[in-house]
Amino acid sequence: MSHTRTSHRQAHRAGSRRGRVAALLTGALAATGLAVMVPTTSTAAAACTTPYSATQVYTGGMSASYNGHNWNAKWWTQGETPSTGGSGVWADQGACGGGGGTTTTPTPSQGTCNHPTWVAGTQYATGTVVKYAPNGQYYVATHDNPGYDPTISTWYWSPYTCTGGGGTSPSPTTTTPNPGGFVVSEAQFNQMFPNRNPFYTYSGLVAALNAYPAFAGTGSDTVKKQEAAAFLANISHETGGLVYVVEQNTANYPHYCDTTQPYGCPAGQAAYYGRGPIQLSWNFNYKAAGDALGIDLLNNPNLVQTDAAVAWKTGIWYWMTQNGPGTMTAHNAMVNGAGFGETIRSINGSIECNGGNPAQVQSRVNAYTSFTSILGVPTGSNLSC
């Protein structure tokens, strides 16, 4: 892998990270975005979600109703009225009805525990309560969604309390994500990255886990280790074995300021180049990641190259929340059995998959195979894309 970091390596972050090549070349940001697209599976008009507000900040995946249609934001936006024009931030989800756009989000409340088990990929309507088998807890759908993981999709799901009843009751013990620490020991981490940059500390990685407890903490011990191996294999490929902290091609630096965003580039035109294990870049991606993590990365992008925990958090943020050019998050690909190949698709899409660059795909697969061997778990199927 070349480590001169060509522009396509940066441009796909938060939505279609690699797909941002088109955005860089044409300025057509409408072709890509941050959103997890919610398909409409019913021919009947869906219920209208919360009405659009010009003063509210919307980030990728958030929805609003406007003029009898539901809309999904592809990336961060404020004050842009939902339409198919403009910057292309809004995706039309079709006509809605049944409440005139004033649907009230249900408040989680106590009830009887006779709810079905959550199934990935199943369409769930607002108000549906499910049991999440990996931790035995219950969740209520706060927005319609096609089976997103309740432990990471806080926009679509909220915890739900229930007791008694004729159905299944909550597990008497709660599964703690990453019990006793990360599923990869420090010795194993050092074995995986013998030549890593000292910046990428194991302690920084462990400190970052609290941002997304479901990361490498969902499912069986085998699945947890497979997900950890998959994440580490991909970021190893991105950074040359955790050697590079920042993008090496400095000529690209001025390219990552999208001046159409209302917040601009307060840290400077050339301040949003690739940094960290996932090589986060573009002002809108720093804004989105910072908003999600509660860190002002828009004004302080250098935190991603000076604070190891922050750097690791940006990588885990992408892994847990962004579909990229794929159809699912890398996290969901691993915990729902889609396989390692789908994590590659979520990171690089057709640039590598479908014969785009088989050598790059194989490099990632080789790293994953090596890391699962170190962790003592099988690779699972569907390694390639």
Image (spheres, rainbow, N blue to C red):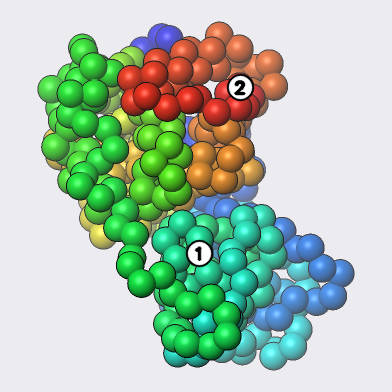
Task: Please say if the residues under marks 1 and 2 sit with CB atoms less than 8 Å apart.
Answer: no
> Along the line of sight, which residue is nearer the eye, 309 or 18?
309
Identify the residue at horizontal 27%, vertical 32% (top origin): 184
Q: Which residue is mark 1?
A: 132
Q: Position of residue 159 (x, y in %)?
A: 42, 74
User: Disc 2 designates what residue?
Assistant: 384
Disc with the residue nearer the chain's start (1 vs 2): 1
Report whether 187 appears left or right of 209: left
Q: At label 1, which amino acid type do we have?
A: Tyr
Quarter residue 302 falls in: top left
Residue 261 in the image: above or below residue 359: below
Kind of residue at badge 2: Ser
Badge nearest the viewer, 1 or 2: 1
When the figure is inspected, residue 137 is found, relative to residue 195, above or below; the finding is below
Q: Position of residue 377 (x, y in %)?
A: 42, 27
Please give left or right for residue 186 compared with residue 131 in the image: left
Left or right of 191? Residue 212 is right
Label 2 CA crowd tier, 10 Å (few <14, some 14–19, many 20+): some
Is 131 in front, or is 249? 131
Q: Residues within 10 Å of mark 1 (few under 14, many from 20)?
A: some
Quadrant of the drawing holding the N terminus? top left
Where does residue 234 sit, x and y in percent of width and height? 42, 26
**Residue shown at 17% from the left, 29% from the top:** 186
Please report the residue visible at 20 percent of the width from the left and 20 percent of the height from the top.
190
Marker count (numbered): 2
The reply to whether residue 273 is visible in this rendering is: yes
Mark 2 falls on what kind of element?
loop
Residue toward you, 384 or 307: 384
The C terminus is located in which quarter? Answer: top right
* Distance from the alpha carbon under mark 1 to that under mark 2: 29 Å
Q: Which mark is residue 114?
A: none
